Amino acid sequence: TPFHPLEPPPHDPNVVAPPQPVVATTLAAPAQPVVATTPAAAAQPVIATTPAAVAQPVVATTPVAAAPATAQGLPAGSSAMAAPDRDVGLIVVNAALTRVGAPYIWGDAGPDSFDCSGLVVWAFHQAGITVPHSSEALATGGQPVALDQMQPGDVISFFPDASHVGIYVGDGRVIHASFEGLPVTVEPLYTAPINGVRRYG
């Protein structure tokens, strides 16, 4: 059979086909899974907060002025010192208070040492009044006064025999020259039994 050049040659089973060249192909990379990422949190706006109010200091109101104390420890507002020199009683009390701390000497009537009745004599003398230098006599002179009616300057006698006297200064206190070894002092009224109260002037 004539060979036609345009036709493929007849297959010869004894002819081995030449090996085909291996063409290297690049495999497409497998698709990577899409990882969902959390978007960065948007910057939060700064919220201006009102700071807690600072505790305000307590403003002290105008204090009530305390009554100044006298050298003898009696406040100026006490009944004995409320109106110095207003009457005999207050003159007597203020005079006696200047002798606080003076020594006791029996029979003395000041100005630097006293016995009990001597202090009374000296204090009343500053008010221009003369009284006896004897506790017993002081317990019976002047005008009697009830205990609940006492006023500054009243003379108080103590003990059943009226062997001791002092001067009422107000606020439940008495000034007196007690006895040897103790100076003129101001003490609570009821440190000794009261015999009676007399008012002079």
Image (cartoon, grey):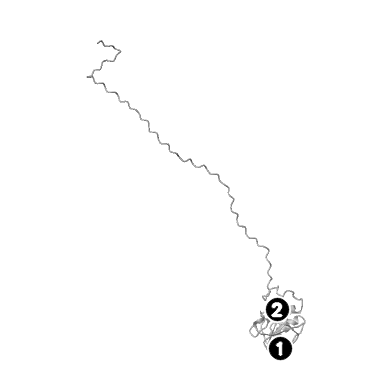
**Which picture quadrant has residue 114?**
bottom right
Q: Nearer the viewer, residue 135 or 139?
A: 139
| Vertical arrangement, residue 40 with respect to residue 1, above or below | below
| Vertical arrangement, residue 3 with respect to residue 41, above or below | above
Bin the neighbour count of mark 2 within 10 Å (Cα to Cα): few under 14, some 14-19, many 20 and up: many
Query: Callout 2, which amino acid?
Result: Val
Bin the neighbour count of mark 1 within 10 Å (Cα to Cα): few under 14, some 14-19, many 20 and up: some
Q: Secondary structure at mark 1?
A: helix
Q: Nearer the viewer, residue 189 or 100?
A: 189
Residue 199's spot in the image, x, y percent? Answer: 74, 83
* Residue lying farthest to the left in this orientation: 14
Query: Callout 1, which amino acid?
Result: Glu
Q: Which mark is residue 169?
A: 2
- Indicate which disc, 1 or 2, sits on the residue closer to the N terminus: 1
Label 1 with label 2: CB-CB less than 8 Å: no
Residue 98's spot in the image, x, y percent? Answer: 70, 78
Q: CA distance from mark 1 to mark 2?
A: 20 Å
Residue 125's spot in the image, x, y percent? Answer: 75, 82
Q: Which mark is residue 166?
A: none
Q: Secondary structure at mark 2?
A: strand
Residue 133's spot in the image, x, y percent? Answer: 72, 87
Please indicate, yes or no, whether residue 109 appears anywhere in the rendered image.
no
Residue identifier under label 1: 136
User: Quarter holding the C terminus?
Assistant: bottom right
